[in-house]
Image (tube, rainbow, N blue to C red):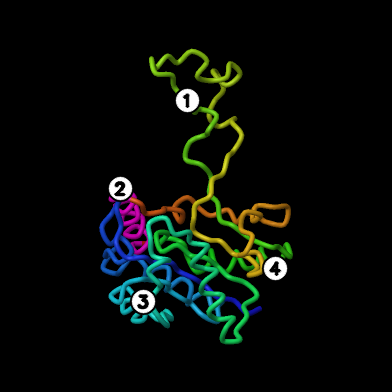
Amino acid sequence: MNSIAIIPARSGSKGLKDKNIKLLEGKPLLSYTIHAAIQSKQFDIVYVSTDSEEYASISRAYGASVPSLRPKDLSEDRTSTWDVVKYILEEYKQKGVIFDTVMLLQPTSPLRTMNDIIVSFELFKEKDADAVVSVCETEHSPLWCNTLPENLCMNYFLKTELSNKPRQELQKFYRLNGAIYLLKTELVDRVSELYNENCYAYVMKKEHSIDIDDIYDFRMAEAILKERYED
């Protein structure tokens, strides 16, 4: 199966300055995703899409392919990641290179391992799936959540049947963790249909599911990595 990994790494960041190249345990954040992708041996190409020559240089140093910089019109705050994926696949198509599958790997999930990638592919093949998307168990049950009125009154905040129920007896819920999106390339043009009957969840460990958006996420990733290295 002909496959490409695409790692979108736009420069700058409003939440955490230059987070994609911020040093995490001595290495640029995006290097962890590049390394996991290459070590998995699942891809013909591990491609980093960036608008920065500095990011491109760092990515190449860690073994990724960065043939050119991302166009300005695909580097805006509102740019859809899937539009970037479409652009890259179309570029290769123009060169006569067609991929069967594409895996989108966000660089902000540095704790995703090569094994997570490998097992996602195994599930994809086992299920004869159109797509596999990574999830993890929610940190807190949404059954304990509700909206609040302006006066902050908590009348009927929880459903009556949940009021005295132990947390361990509640149904498990899962959330998208943003770490892995594996799909047939033909589905990229209709990603609104991604979550269908032939899309399956790859359940990742919570400690692999940190998605770095701010300094608190970053510090959590640092702590987990230190523990991983010590083990």
* Residue 155, horizontal then vertical, whole percent: 48, 13
Judging by the rendered image, the residue that carries numbered circle 3 is 59
Tell which tag, 3 or 4, sits nearer the viewer.
3
Going 49% across and 26% down the picture, which residue do you hit? 146
Residue 224 sits inside the magenta stretch: yes
Label 3 with label 2: CB-CB less than 8 Å: no
**Which amino acid does the dot numbered 1 rest on?**
Thr
Local packing at callout 4 (Cα closer than 10 Å; few below 14, some 14-19, many 20+) is few
Q: Name the N-terminal-most of marks 2 and 4.
A: 4
What is the quadrant of residue 2 in the picture? bottom right
Going 48% across and 73% down the picture, which residue do you hit? 37
* Residue 156, horizontal then vertical, whole percent: 52, 15
Residue most toward the bottom?
Answer: 95
Disc 2 to disc 1, C-alpha distance: 25 Å
Q: Name the N-terminal-most of marks 3 and 2.
A: 3
Q: Name the N-terminal-most of marks 3 and 1.
A: 3
Q: Name the N-terminal-most of marks 2 and 1.
A: 1
Judging by the rendered image, the residue that carries numbered circle 4 is 125
| Mark 2 secondary-structure assignment | helix
**Which amino acid does the dot numbered 2 rest on?**
Tyr
Tell which tag, 2 or 1, sits nearer the viewer.
1
Judging by the rendered image, the residue that carries numbered circle 2 is 216
Q: Main secondary structure of the magenta part?
A: helix
* Residue 133, horizontal then vertical, whole percent: 59, 57
Label 3 with label 1: CB-CB less than 8 Å: no
Disc 2 to disc 4, C-alpha distance: 36 Å
| Mark 1 secondary-structure assignment | loop
| Residue stretch rendered in magenta on the structure | 214-230
Q: Name the N-terminal-most of marks 1 and 4.
A: 4
**Which amino acid does the dot numbered 4 rest on?**
Lys
